[in-house]
Image: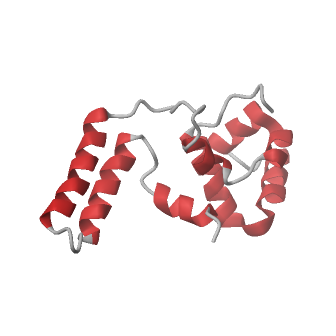
Amino acid sequence: MSDLRPLTNEEHAAVLEYALAHGADWKDELNTDWMNARTTGILQALRNSHGPSWLADYSLADWPRSLFSAETTLAHTPSPRLAALACRKLILAYVDNPEQVRWEDVQDALAVAIEAFGLPVNFIEMARAVAPD
């Protein structure tokens, strides 16, 4: 498994979307779909590049964990301008009202940060779905 290239954000997102749609037995179902040529696009390309043995070792937590690993290089070149804009939005939200920062301001800053790092628009919902309680 170590000689396989890391998954891209799009590949992780495709696997997560499949898993959320197919429930607890998603790996068995994906493997069956792979063997019967019932997948297309990213999932089929992933089967061709990584194969069924990779799937057995894959964890849905691999993606969020990899985003915070010092060894991981981002597949997307971050936009320093957008990252700085997200920080400014959070700082201004706090400066405007340190007693009660508006949730809308936090969400706005988060959306800019997600764009800055090339993450899927629904990254927060996807991460929440696999996060431990």
| Residue at x 63% of width, y 55% of height | 16
| Residue at x 30% of width, y 34% of height | 80
| Residue at x 22% of width, y 54% of height | 91
Can residue 41 be seen?
no
Apparent side of residue 101 relative to residue 43 in the rendered image (left or right): left
Residue 63: x and y, percent?
62, 47
Identify the image quadrant of the N terminus. Answer: top right
- Decide which of 63, 29 is in the foreground and name it: 63
- Decide which of 59, 18 is in the foreground and name it: 59
Q: Picture quarter containing residue 126? A: bottom right
Residue 24: x and y, percent?
77, 67
| Residue at x 71% of width, y 65% of height | 22
| Vertical comparison of 65 with 78: above or below | below
Apparent side of residue 34 relative to residue 98 in the rendered image (left or right): right
Toward the bottom, the furthest residue is 100
Toward the front, the furthest residue is 99
Residue 21: x and y, percent?
65, 65
Q: How many marks?
A: 0
Apparent side of residue 43 relative to residue 108 in the rendered image (left or right): right
Identify the image quadrant of the C terminus. Answer: bottom right
Apparent side of residue 115 relative to residue 33 in the rendered image (left or right): left
